[in-house]
Image (cartoon, rainbow, N blue to C red):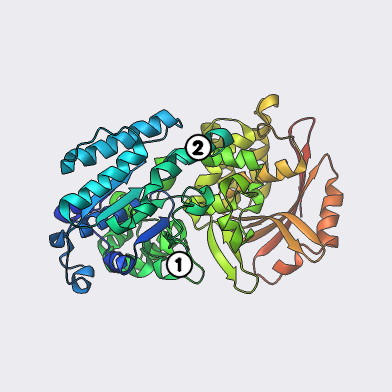
């Protein structure tokens, strides 16, 4: 049985303790020849810290750790450098004081490790002194690795004043790197958000961003080929546990964890944390969200008044990804970089991306998180309601499904039956239904356009396609008539599945679904 490195982010520990390692070392060589200043953004739990640790081992000359890996045949010199490895993952209190403490601790640790003494107290000057002293002491250039550079910023992303203060402090810390070019062999910076969005590397105008370069699309994450080459033990074990063939296991894994694209026309990759966890636990569970959801994302959703029904299938210009955070007009680039949506298509002529949810784990997990922000109730009650809805829908019982939803919404106190700071509108009602139907892990789409209008909600199960028109204090017969007049069902008549029309009326007085008709 394979030994899966769950939560282990140190390359040497993985190699020395015989954990499974998917060989990414060809990228290490390609990035560093002739790269010097490199930036990479990837979502959380995607292997950024392990990649940074691998750079550390490589530049430290640890040839023994790379035995049998791709880079062993590529690298001929194995020159040893002094490596300064920083991580700002712990600087999340959102204060300048905490940031200073974390930076000071890591600088002092590196000074002690290399026998450097100084009376300088200014963080930026001390960082500069550390690099120049090491160069003078060893006679070789220094390597600087900075992991999770944006952790302090993400904590205050929704707070303009604190964000500006934190940005200024980090800019001061990183600024010496440009003037120290002769002393540096390689600088690697990684985080979730793309550097140009946070405007802290304005002085590092020679920083190469490889985040959306096709040749580095699989530098983090697991490709389909890597899955089938490295995880045969886990695939067979899952097959025995669930009485599935290897092909069925692979299809289930792809549906649940695959689908991330970090460049146009690039291969899809799996979330490595979720894939490893599924293999280790022998279970197709949703693991990524169990490690915590960034509060900054929920804050930004509210800040932008984002319409959750329009995120899947949304389109953005390529230039939108480079907008400074303080000037962002949309949450979509941040949603993309955080891993909640991914590239689904690209138009090279118009230069815009089509974005969407990468897989089942992300979509269902996100909807679970959003339910309290739409109905302000506990997850337990929501889970029970969703369970009853799911059982009904499995039997093609849309009437029973809507009854379960009606009962659930009716139990929510009056003042809680709406997203905080948002009115109870037809749009909000549509979003609430969209979130709840998405939790059933069926195909759900909202605001589906055709030549004559926009369909409110489309649901596809294995046997049935439901075409839904929603009204607020409206007339059910008119809603059904609208479905017919605007030809909402026509695109699905040749699908082979039964097509069902559903009209739903929401009462603002009763604050719940009042009635519905199914034809």
Q: Quadrant of the N terminus?
A: bottom left
Q: Nearer the viewer, residue 117 or 286?
A: 117
Residue nearer the viewer, 475 or 153: 153
- Which mark is in front, 2 or 1? 1
What percent of the width, then of the height, locates residue 431? Answer: 67, 45
The answer to whether residue 94 of the structure is visible from this angle is yes
Could you tell me residue 193's position as x and y percent? 48, 50
Q: Residues within 10 Å of mark 2 (few under 14, many from 20)?
A: some
The answer to which of 269 and 149 lies nearer the viewer is 149
For the point 57% across and 47% down, the residue is 325
Residue at the image position 60 percent from the left and 42 percent from the top: 301
For residue 139, the mark is: none
Q: CA distance from mark 2 to mark 1?
A: 29 Å
Q: Position of residue 478 (x, y in %)?
A: 87, 51
Is residue 8 at all visible to an observer of this figure?
no
Q: Residue visible at 60% across and 35% down?
A: 373
Q: Residue beneath label 1, please?
A: 213
N-term-proximal mark, 2 vs 1: 1
Dot 1, crowdedness within 10 Å: few (<14), some or many (≥20)?
some
Q: Is residue 414 above or below residue 186?
A: above
Q: Residue furthest left?
A: 64
Question: Which residue has dot 2 on it?
Answer: 295
At mark 2, the secondary structure is helix
Secondary structure of residue under mark 1 = loop
Give the x, y percent position of residue 519. Answer: 76, 55
Which residue sits at x=58%, y=36%? 160
Q: Nearer the viewer, residue 61 or 375?
A: 61
Classify 471 as above or below 336: above
């Amino acid at each position: 049985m394979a030994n899966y490195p769950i939560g282990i982010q140190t390359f040497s520990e993985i190699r020395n303790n015989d954990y499974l390692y998917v060989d990414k070392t060809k990228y290490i060589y390609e990035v560093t020849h002739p790269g010097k200043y490199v930036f990479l953004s990837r979502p959380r739990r995607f292997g950024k810290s392990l990649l940074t640790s691998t750079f550390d081992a490589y530049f430290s000359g640890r040839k023994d750790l790379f035995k049998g890996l791709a880079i062993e045949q590529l690298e001929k010199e194995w020159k040893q450098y002094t490596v300064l490895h920083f991580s700002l993952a712990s600087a999340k209190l959102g204060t300048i004081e905490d940031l200073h403490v974390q930076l000071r601790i890591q600088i002092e640790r590196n000074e002690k490790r290399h026998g450097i003494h100084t009376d300088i107290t200014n963080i930026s000057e001390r960082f500069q002194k550390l690099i120049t002293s090491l160069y003078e002491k060893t006679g070789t250039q220094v390597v600087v690795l900075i992991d999770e550079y944006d952790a302090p910023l993400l904590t205050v992303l929704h707070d303009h004043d604190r964000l500006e203060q934190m940005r200024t402090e980090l800019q001061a810390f990183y600024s010496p790197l440009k003037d120290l070019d002769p002393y540096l062999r390689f600088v690697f910076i990684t985080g979730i958000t793309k550097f140009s969005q946070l405007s802290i590397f304005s002085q590092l105008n020679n920083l190469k961003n490889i985040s959306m370069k096709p040749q580095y699309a699989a530098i983090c994450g697991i490709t389909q080929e890597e899955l089938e080459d490295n995880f045969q033990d886990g695939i067979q074990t899952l097959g025995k546990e669930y009485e599935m063939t290897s092909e069925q296991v692979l299809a289930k894994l792809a549906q649940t964890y695959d689908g991330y694209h970090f460049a146009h026309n690039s291969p899809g990759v799996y979330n490595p944390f979720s894939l490893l966890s599924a293999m280790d636990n022998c279970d197709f569970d949703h693991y990524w969200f169990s490690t915590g959801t960034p509060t900054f994302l929920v804050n930004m959703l509210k800040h932008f008044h984002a319409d959750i029904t329009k995120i899947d299938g949304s389109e953005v210009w390529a230039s939108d990804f480079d907008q400074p955070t303080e000037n962002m007009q949309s949450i979509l680039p941040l949603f993309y970089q955080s891993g909640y949506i991914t590239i689904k298509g690209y138009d090279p002529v118009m230069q815009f991306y089509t974005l969407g949810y990468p897989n089942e784990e992300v979509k269902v997990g996100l909807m679970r998180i959003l339910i309290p922000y739409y109905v302000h109730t506990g997850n337990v009650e929501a889970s029970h309601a969703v369970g009853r809805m799911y059982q009904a829908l499995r039997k093609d019982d849309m009437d029973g499904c809507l009854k379960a939803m009606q009962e659930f919404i009716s139990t929510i106190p009056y003042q809680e039956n709406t997203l905080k700071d948002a009115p109870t509108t037809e749009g909000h009602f549509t979003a609430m239904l969209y979130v709840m139907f998405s939790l059933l892990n069926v195909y759900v789409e909202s605001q589906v356009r055709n030549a004559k209008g926009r369909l409110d909600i489309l649901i596809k199960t294995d046997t049935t396609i439901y075409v839904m028109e929603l009204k607020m204090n409206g007339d059910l017969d008119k809603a059904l008539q609208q479905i017919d007049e605007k030809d909402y069902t026509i695109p699905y008549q040749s699908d082979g599945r039964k097509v069902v029309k559903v009209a739903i009326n929401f009462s603002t007085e009763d604050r719940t679904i009042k009635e519905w008709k199914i034809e």
